[in-house]
Image (spheres, rainbow, N blue to C red):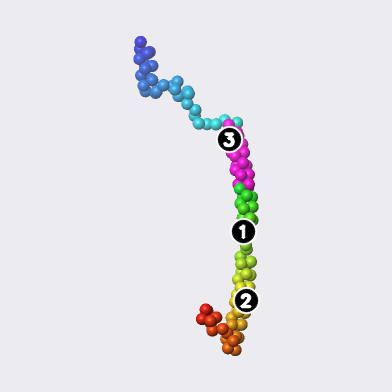
């Protein structure tokens, strides 16, 4: 009778120790950790393959619409060419204007 009372009091004080045995302490075995890392590596490889496939698909789409990478030096070269063309046109305009051969309607449009 006394032992039952002490056991009941222990249960109240410490809780049900049988319940604690069912709980996992959160620690993993080496094999479980290895398997987790293998799963992560496999998932990463799959993600990378999907990203590479998506990138290839995007490159194909960009090629179809005529988009291609352009370097800054190419842009600068094109700007220099346009600037030279504009300068040539200005010289021609000034020459025609100096000779009086420039169309007045053209001058008003500028």
Which part of the image, by quadrant, shows the N terminus?
top left
Examine the image and state in which quarter residue 85 appears. Answer: bottom right
Q: Residue, x 59% and y 82% (percent of image)? A: 93
Q: Could you say where residue 98 lies in the image, as x and y percent from the top left?
A: 58, 88
The numbered mark, 3 or 2, whose residue comes first in the sequence reads 3
Task: Tell me the number on the disc at residue 84.
Answer: 2
Task: Tell me the number on the disc at residue 28.
Answer: none
Q: Could you say where residue 77 lies in the image, as x and y percent from the top left?
A: 63, 70
Q: Could you say where residue 106 lies in the image, as x and y percent from the top left?
A: 55, 80
The numbered mark, 3 or 1, whose residue comes first in the sequence reads 3
Cα separation between marks 3 and 1: 42 Å
Task: Please tell me which residue lies in front, 36 or 52.
Answer: 52
Task: Please tell me which residue lies in front, 3 or 78.
Answer: 78
- Viewer can see residue 7: yes
The magenta span reads 32-53
Q: Which structural element holds mark 2?
A: helix
Cα separation between marks 3 and 2: 64 Å
| Label 1 crowd bin: few (<14), some (14–19), many (20+), radius 10 Å | few
Cα separation between marks 2 and 1: 26 Å
From the viewer's perspective, is residue 108 above or below residue 5?
below
Examine the image and state in which quarter residue 42 appears. Answer: top right
Q: Residue, x 37% and y 23% (percent of image)? A: 13
Task: Tell me the number on the disc at residue 36.
Answer: 3
- Viewer can see residue 30: no
**CB atoms at circles 3 and 1 under 8 Å apart?**
no
């Amino acid at each position: 009778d006394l032992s039952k009372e002490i056991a009941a009091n222990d249960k109240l004080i410490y809780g049900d120790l049988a319940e604690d045995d069912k709980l996992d302490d959160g620690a993993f075995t080496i094999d479980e950790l290895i398997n987790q890392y293998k799963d992560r590596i496999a998932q990463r490889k799959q993600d990378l393959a999907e990203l590479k496939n998506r990138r290839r698909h995007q490159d194909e789409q960009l090629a179809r619409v005529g988009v291609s990478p352009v370097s800054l030096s190419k842009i600068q070269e094109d700007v220099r060419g346009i600037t030279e063309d504009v300068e040539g046109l200005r010289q021609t305009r000034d020459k025609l204007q100096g000779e009086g051969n420039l169309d007045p309607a053209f001058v008003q449009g500028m």
